[in-house]
Image: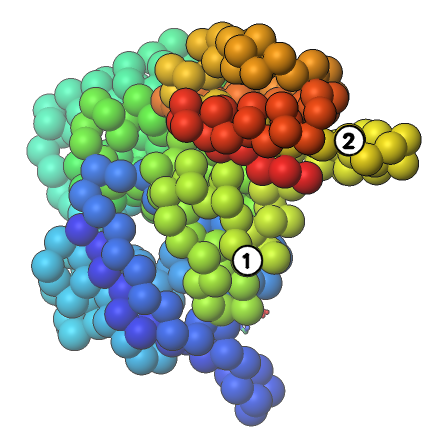
Amino acid sequence: MIRLQNLRKNYTVQGKTVPALMGIDLTIEKGEIFGIIGHSGAGKSTLIRCINMLERPTSGHVIVDGVDLTTLDDRKLQEQRRQIGMIFQHFNLLSSATVAENVAFPLKLAKRPKAEIDKKVNELLTLVGLEAHRDKYPSQLSGGQKQRVGIARALASDPKVLLCDEATSALDPQTTNSILALLLDINRKLGLTIVLITHEMHVIRSICDRVGVIDGGVIVEEGKVLDVFLKPQHPTTREFVEQVADSAELREVVAHEKAAGDQTIVRITFLGEKTYQPILFQTMQETGTMFSILQGTISRMKDTPYGQLVVELSGNPEQNSRAIETLRQRGLEVEVM
Ligand SMILES: Nc1ncnc2c1ncn2[C@@H]1O[C@H](COP(=O)(O)OP(=O)(O)OP(=O)(O)O)[C@@H](O)[C@H]1O
Ligand SMILES: [Mg+2]
């Protein structure tokens, strides 16, 4: 759906060249939710703005649905851009226009007939749950409601792709979750491809299928959210994963236990169905190993439930290694800490 090939972007500041993107290669599949995570200044906004050519890349290619946008003249580009909607951190609504007028705006620009516009606006306001607010002005809305207007407006021209630049960063956690749920709903109902950028791992974990980690203008890691989450390779990725794991607390517990003797401490990861099966208890019983749970979480990555338990094994060394072996045979991920 979207292919970025050796994408580079330099800014010129007071005669000096500032490289923002340094050769990005990325393929985003049709219908997926692709997350891009990175620290401030990593190049996230530059990257997403290159996808709809709000920012002209210095070199490289941006291919959306088979069309290389970098080769188009302004008029053709304008046409192609209708396929790409965008929402922003600060919503970018017209403050002197009502909710309905904001949503109608791109359709008016495209000179669609009034009846068609009215119908479309009604559909979109229903989709985002704002029917009751259609005649209000942005200043009368909450942050979450403003972003819903942003989403409805972005969908007005029936785009195939929706770009989200930190779309939930100005919202509180509960409102963030409701907007993420709406994006997931739209992705499923309309088959829309969504690219979202964020600096919050929580956002990635909630709704993304795949993720790319950007650091210093390059993608340093990329993969399925589940894989990247459970086995982060790059230091930057690990930092982001730690945002959503109580790692500091865990390190303390492990250090404390290690200081008390040479116990075997393992981290066991359960995925999908296995999260709810009594595999751990069964295995410990069979191998005659005693254990105590030091820390545990059950959570969810988009649709996949997963659990992580940090467990101290207090059988003899032979029992412990047999227990670990058996857990692995039964499909659990076991990491000795
Ligand atoms: N218009 C511009 N002119 C000059 N330099 C720019 C411009 N926009 C971005 N940059 C520089 O390019 C780099 C990447 O910026 P970008 O805005 O893409 O980062 P970001 O990951 O979106 O950061 P944030 O999380 O703070 O929004 C930074 O070093 C930034 O200073
Ligand atoms: Mg940015």
Q: Is residue 116 left or right of residue 200?
A: left
Amino acid beneath label 2: Gln
Relative to 273, say whether 158 is above or below.
Answer: below
Residues 332 and 119: in front is 332
Is the CB of the residue bearing disc 2 within 8 angstroms of ligand 1? no
Helix, strand or loop under label 2? loop
Mark found first going from the N terminus, 2 or 1: 1
The image quarter in which residue 254 lies: top right
Residue 197 in view of the camera = no
Q: Which residue is mark 1?
A: 234
Question: Residue 268, how many percent across, how many down?
Answer: 56, 27
Q: Residue furthest right?
A: 260
Q: Residues within 10 Å of mark 1 (few under 14, many from 20)?
A: few
Query: What residue lies at 42% left-to-right and 42% top-to-bottom?
Result: 227
Question: Residue 301, how many percent across, how many down?
Answer: 44, 27
Q: Residues within 10 Å of mark 2 (few under 14, many from 20)?
A: some
Q: Which residue is mark 2?
A: 263
